[in-house]
Amino acid sequence: MKDESIVIVGAGHAAMALCASLAEAGQGQRLILVSDEHELPYQRPPLSKAFLKNADVTAQVLRDAAWFAAAGIELVLGEAAWSIDREARTVTLRSGRSLAYGQLVLATGTRARRMPGWPEAANVHVLRSAQDARALRDGLAASRSVTILGGGFIGLEVAATCAALGKPVTVLEAGPRLMGRAVSEALSAHALQVHRANGVQVQLQATVGAPEFSQARLLRLAGQSGVHDVDMLLLAIGAEPNAELAEAAGLDCDKGIVVDAQMRTSDPQILALGDCAQFPLGQTRLRLESIQNAQDQARVAASSLLGGSASYQPVPWFWSEQGGMRLQMVGLLGAGPAETFRRQGAQPGAFSLFHYQQGLLRCVESVNAPADYMMARKLLEAGASPPGPQVADPGQPLRALMPNA
Ligand SMILES: Cc1cc2nc3c(=O)[nH]c(=O)nc-3n(C[C@H](O)[C@H](O)[C@H](O)COP(=O)(O)OP(=O)(O)OC[C@H]3O[C@@H](n4cnc5c(N)ncnc54)[C@H](O)[C@@H]3O)c2cc1C
């Protein structure tokens, strides 16, 4: 008899949202969730925020063991999926255990990028898992100063935490501006000013050259900006999709596991979602690393697994917390010039940037303006594009600009 089990590889945000959707739908198939981590699935966003500030904070589990039992989900912890036999429809785990599947879901996420050629060093950290975060927190407590390679979201969140803890912290960013891949120039410039005012040393266009290691510790980095002594270093230079399992199984991969709008890979019995999946959006293909993406793709994947036809057409959103700034972004800024309208928020230092391209509202970035951000999100989700001067007028309630308001 054919095995109709659903096997999910990876137990992060995407997999857990999928389990929740499937449990809610009361689907009848056997569900097996395989995680290479040893702990119950947990929230990742706090790991670069509240978790680092206080040694008593523990990782927040997404669901406890009782929930898995009640939902009838078999949770296999501490076991990596090692290979897929698409012909036989089996997944083999590192222990040698073989799991038969009717449908397989890859939710393998990403891993932190490392510096090519660098050896392991006790004072060099990355931040992806709860285990990484515990090691980083211990390292912070024992270090006099911190160097962070990379001025993206994770690097800057940790930098802000270090500054709040009173640790001297330096961010070395190779690009000309902070968060350069993800936010507008105006927001980058604002963030730079705030971080510097909070005591974070930021060097832009800081390419690092030869590292000097001794006794499994990184001692210093030589770069264009001179020699930089290192007490402790966080590598925050981006993430790479865990796509090797899919690649080895012969699935289409291109900087991620290629899926269609129903989250199906090039093998219709195998789906992929979350940070590892590269999906179609309009004329382009994209891979996003965000909770919104993981959760919304999970709803679509649940529909596909249960025979539905939902498709993923996101209005992406993201948030970050950095040194008193709550950054919230919705929409995507395409290539090419944008016209930006700034709306002052209710509090000092609060504002939103409304970005228009080809006359249409494409993206909104808010700093400490959650009410404006929520309304902006509704506007974008409704496909509305009110005139720029109107959104920039703080006397104009955004709600009034909704179609049919
Ligand atoms: C420190 C940090 C802070 C973040 N902050 C924010 C934020 O503020 N806002 C936001 O929107 N997003 C944030 N993110 C991003 C967000 O956490 C990710 O987008 C989200 O976790 C993606 O979910 P996922 O399930 O695709 O991947 P993950 O949550 O990474 O889960 C993938 C899981 O699969 C496991 N796995 C991989 N390969 C195998 C295998 N072969 N066998 C078994 N298991 C395997 C991995 O170990 C991992 O547990 C943050 C991420 C980090 C690391």
Image (spheres, grey):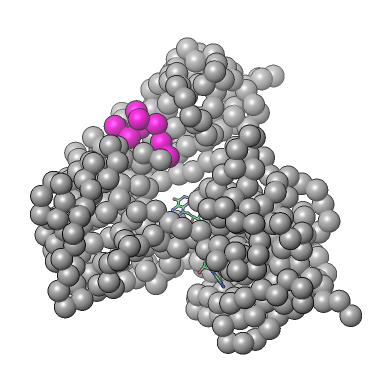
Quarter where residue 135 is shown: bottom left
165 shown above or below 280: below
Q: Which residues are magenta?
A: 182-190
- Please state the horizontal and vertical placement of residue 305, each as a whole percent of the image: 77, 60
Instruction: Please say whether residue 188 is one of the residues in the magenta stretch.
Output: yes
Q: Main secondary structure of the magenta part?
A: helix
Q: Quadrant of the C terminus?
A: top right
Quarter where residue 213 is shown: bottom left
297 shown above or below 140: above
Between 351 and 262, the one lying in front of the other is: 262
169 lies left or right of 250: left
Residue depicted at 28% across the width and 73% down the height = 120
- Please state the horizontal and vertical placement of residue 2, each as a whole percent of the image: 86, 76
105 lies left or right of 115: right
- Please state the horizontal and vertical placement of residue 167, each as a whole percent of the image: 17, 57
347 shown above or below 121: above
Residue at the limit of the structure toward the right, as seen here: 1
**Residue 98 in view (yes/no):** yes
Between 160 and 124, the one lying in front of the other is: 124
Instruction: Please say whether residue 135 is one of the residues in the magenta stretch.
Output: no
In this figure, what is the number of numbered marks? 0
Residue depicted at 82% across the width and 76% down the height = 3
Q: Quadrant of the N terminus?
A: bottom right
